[in-house]
Amino acid sequence: MKANKTKYDVNPDLAKERLKCNFNIEEVTFIIDGGKEKTLQRKKIEDIALNNGDSLDEVPEECLSIKERYENAVRKSCIYSNKVRREMLEITGIENYASPVLRRTADAFFKDISPFMLHLGMFVPALMGQSTPDQLAEWLPKALDMQIIGAYAQTELGHGTFIRGLETTATYDPEKEEFVLHSPTLTSYKWWAGGLGTTANHCVVMAQLYTKGECHGTHLFIVQIRDLDTHMPLTGIKVGEIGPRMGFSSADNGFLGFNQFRIPRENMLMKHAKVEKDGTYVKSARHGKLTYGTMVFVRVTLVSEMSFNISKAATIAVRYSAVRRQSELRPNEPEPQILDYPTQQHKLFICIATAHAFQLTASWLWNTYEVVMADMKKGNVDALPELHALSSCLKAVSTSDALSHIEQCRFACGGHGYMLSSNLPFLYSFVAATRTYEGDYTVLLLQTARFLVKAWEQAEAGKGVTQTVSYLNRSANSKRVNWDNTHEGIIKSFQAIAAGKIAQCVKSIRDRIKSGMDYEDAWLMTTVQLVGAAEAHCRAVLLGTYWNEMKRITKTSSENVRKVLHQLAVLYLMYWALEKTGDLLKYASVSKKDLDELQRRYEELLAELRPNAVGLVDAFDLRDEILHSSLGSYDGRVYERLMEEAQKSPLNAEPVNPSFHKYIKPLMLGKL
Amino acid sequence: MKANKTKYDVNPDLAKERLKCNFNIEEVTFIIDGGKEKTLQRKKIEDIALNNGDSLDEVPEECLSIKERYENAVRKSCIYSNKVRREMLEITGIENYASPVLRRTADAFFKDISPFMLHLGMFVPALMGQSTPDQLAEWLPKALDMQIIGAYAQTELGHGTFIRGLETTATYDPEKEEFVLHSPTLTSYKWWAGGLGTTANHCVVMAQLYTKGECHGTHLFIVQIRDLDTHMPLTGIKVGEIGPRMGFSSADNGFLGFNQFRIPRENMLMKHAKVEKDGTYVKSARHGKLTYGTMVFVRVTLVSEMSFNISKAATIAVRYSAVRRQSELRPNEPEPQILDYPTQQHKLFICIATAHAFQLTASWLWNTYEVVMADMKKGNVDALPELHALSSCLKAVSTSDALSHIEQCRFACGGHGYMLSSNLPFLYSFVAATRTYEGDYTVLLLQTARFLVKAWEQAEAGKGVTQTVSYLNRSANSKRVNWDNTHEGIIKSFQAIAAGKIAQCVKSIRDRIKSGMDYEDAWLMTTVQLVGAAEAHCRAVLLGTYWNEMKRITKTSSENVRKVLHQLAVLYLMYWALEKTGDLLKYASVSKKDLDELQRRYEELLAELRPNAVGLVDAFDLRDEILHSSLGSYDGRVYERLMEEAQKSPLNAEPVNPSFHKYIKPLMLGKL
């Protein structure tokens, strides 16, 4: 496992840290990857893609203009796609698409992002999830072989979250057996789709379906938008780039407008609903619920993606903190490594734990997803609302937590964390977007809240509730949870918090109805609390799932691995208990003394984890090429790398910038 | 006050909002600016600088390469400096330098930042604060007239916060009456200084002073680093750009190394300590404390800067929220403005209130600063520790709050908030850096914590404590604060929280000493709690100061202005009470019922403020040129501007990007 070995000596402080580590690092890597075979598969693809030894960028991509950056990213995307062509073609469906290895390995090619990312991330999954077998046979092989390059266009300039508000129309013309796509207004222009602006020649488009004079709501259509030979936009298509964004600046995000643009009837993705030749609309009985599938799939993969991104940030910040020295604890002693400061440990160790928590939760969620999908194939959609509520809140909370933890890692690296060469700003921008796309934080939590309020009413009525909300039964029967200082006790208290908050929301809504509001207004006025209740539910799920999965998985681990992974999970429980003291005091029977004791234990736990910190981030096994970080490389040559990166700036290519003679000197001389 | 009027019609929703506003907007503008005269002065400078009508950028600066961006920013900086040359020369000292009008108006020229920013922001204040009268007479007029351009170099590649750890040396050579500046190691290179990389020809440098074989700690030296005529780095100087950063990408941040570089003895800034010709070191009795001056000054101005930046973000997000429509509250009703959602109001109204809170606190802090400085001139430095503790925590908390509120504004604008044309990403990057530079958040709060622990010990011993910590007397005498639901009651409870947390820290430290640790280790192990205690103290100060200043200032206001500003301040108190329920439950005698009642009142207050929301952000009176925002312009033409901005991207200049033929097509055909 010495793939990270470099030609340089390792920083002595970092080398010492590695000697301190008391557990088998490789064993933890296998656990995070989901088993030894997965680790080997990952390493195989990394070797294929990355063991070429060539340096991909002469000038760092962040120094280029927006146009140069894009063109450079296209170049690298094509190199990468070519390298992994064979692995791509092994993908047969959504079942073996779950492995994020391909997308993660691609990270080595881009500090920012590939213009092909959404081709694989959205276009292909949409085809897989919404095509008939015939459609799949036609489109999928071409897409995986990069014979066509696709985007996924749903959001419009004036419409995001609220899908029913989309304005783009697809009107069926039975005479020609075609759909006519049209953008009636400026706000109906498709907007944001990754890869759509200048790269894609195909696009899955969401539009309001009209046939026989009737609107049947939004459906998906596959649309060729550019000529495959010349790449010119087809007549009736207006397509372009939406302009620079925070992050994602090496790819193209696009806008797309249709002027009475015609596509064949067969280009409607008809797995769950179809339009017959004569224009008759036929939909599956469970059409609405079935289209959830792709959406839920994407959210599930995002939870795992968040784990990956936190693990990058944690690796960078922990290694840097082992190398960086600052201040003095006692007069005339040398400056300590900043990793020795409890305030630093407090910022960083929770990131390591969260990466574990999200990865184990993502695996568990993926298994749940597969079970529900299998049930659905048999016609049973009962479990879908719970899966939907679960994936909604986990997507919201995991992206939000990932963002604040990555930000915290950047803060923990002081000024150097702001250098793009640290990679922390790129990670922040990338993850910031995930908090909004595929369902905004607040909107998703309110969707979960709808489910929770219904579940509460069921529990109250003595009806059964599903597994993830079974704790509601306890509370609905007014059983108070007594605080006990065990780990299971903390999890139970978080369930009590969630139940207490949901109950309080239900009470607020009912009080407001009593005072004369209708249900909609009462709900609306309570939404600030409802968001909090859904977050609390999600915390209870995360804490419980991480704890149970960690215990299950480490049953056969070596002793020290079990011990350190146990410590991390305890840290996670304690951290969140201390973050939520208000809720604990309000909804669980915790005392002030309990909290002080918890605080003391937490501080001791930080010290206990300290010697294994570098080992724990080494276990994420992130190659330097994927980390892209002057602060986080395996060898810890922090200052040398910062200076080497600085030298690459085009501003250092000449000793005097031409603007001096053109502007500054005349200004100095009062002659401007 | 129709400076914002544009040639376009105002979006009808926004126009309606303005009709709803029930208070005199101009009156609130005067309050925020600090009086009518200040508003008029601001508008005068804005007119001089901005009423030229010419468009400054052909291509948006964010589309350019790093080198083009810098050169473009130099061009605009020179134009701007030339325009305000006369106003610059009216500055005579730090007393009339407080007005941030010049720096704020400059924002209209840059989405990002000017390479001259630190010339005015650090170089000039350092001269003002640390020069002898003779030195000031020599250097200041040249600096203000832009005959020389300066940077301020303190931080080194390996050393930030811990100034005593700086490695750059200045060794006095009595024979030649010169100082020899030297950088002994890679980590001793100066690093980060704004404007240093390619722009500045002078620099104030912090170095370890050696004379007669003895080290006297860090002192400041003014150093010419480039030839004024050719701009070539002088022999013995190694200077360059540190490479791209998060934000600040249109300016140059620099590194600087010295190889036995000589400067005249007179170039040491000798206000508080000097080296005589023969090498004798003489320092003022209060040298250590006096050098605080500039540092405290910069922190004071940062609090006001944070108010300004939050007001920008709030203006953008509130106006956009009045224009944007989303979802449906009731079947078949039109989509509501998103400003109608309490979750949105919850995100945004606190930003408006915080801008007020910080501005009023900054004015109060500035007055305190002037009093302390006047005392110091009379030889009385007793008030300095309190001012230092106060400015430390206010800098830390105001920058941190500003950052999270600006981020919240971005979240509140959905996807469009990520467009650089919204300006929200620029605001985030800019403010993110302020959280770290001039004293990292954690480090500053720990400095305040030192002061608080000492104050606690004094209070405990029955000795007097200074004004901002007088609440400690109450708690040290074990008087419990009873919760009362008044506004003063909330403030008292926050003081009780701070006192309770400080007491808990002292207890933790003492317990740990009892268990065998020495003081340093006991302190270190308690730092996570100490950071929390200092933050709590700062909250108590902010809440109390905002409340008292608001009441004082609105005494003579018209009724509706008093009412709306009162509502905002109440919102601020309630928001923070609800954020800190754990602390309230632990340290104040609040009940769960009180908290539920508070939540209900808070939700009602959001609804009460709703009709005045657009009026409140209009009162910030930020010209479109300064806002730089497609989402936040006065006219609310959101969608039109987004599309107009998109069209400016160089990626849209040609229908087919050349990389298609070069890379994508060969890949599609399997011929790469």
Image (cartoon, coloured by chain):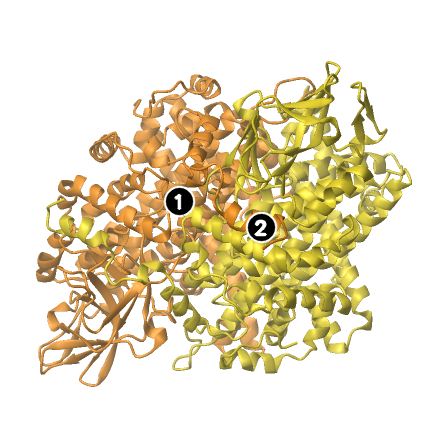
Chain colours: A orange, B yellow
- Letter of the chain that mark 2 sits on in the rendering: A
Amino acid at circle 1? Glu
B551 shown above or below A112? below
B348 shown above or below A2? below
Nearer to me, A472 or B520: B520
Secondary structure of the residue carrying numbered label 1: helix
Spatial separation of the CA atoms under disc 2 and disc 1: 31 Å
The image quadrant where one finds the N terminus of chain A is top left
User: Dot 2: few (<14), some (14–19), or many (≥20) neighbours within 10 Å?
Assistant: some
Secondary structure of the residue carrying numbered label 2: helix
Point 44% across, 76% down: residue:
B329
Nearer to me, B568 or B284: B284
Q: Position of residue B409 (x, y in %)?
A: 53, 60
Nearer to me, B478 or A392: A392
Left or right: B417 as drawn, with respect to B267 = left
B107 shown above or below B322? above
Left or right: A31 as drawn, with respect to A472 = left
Q: Residue A666 carries which label?
A: 2
Ranked by sequence position, the earlier of labels 2 and 1 is 1
Circle 1 residue: A62
Left or right: A634 as drawn, with respect to B214 = left
The image quadrant where one finds the C terminus of chain A is bottom right
User: Dot 1: few (<14), some (14–19), or many (≥20) neighbours within 10 Å?
Assistant: many
Point 12% across, 59% down: residue:
A229
Left or right: A170 as drawn, with respect to B249 = left
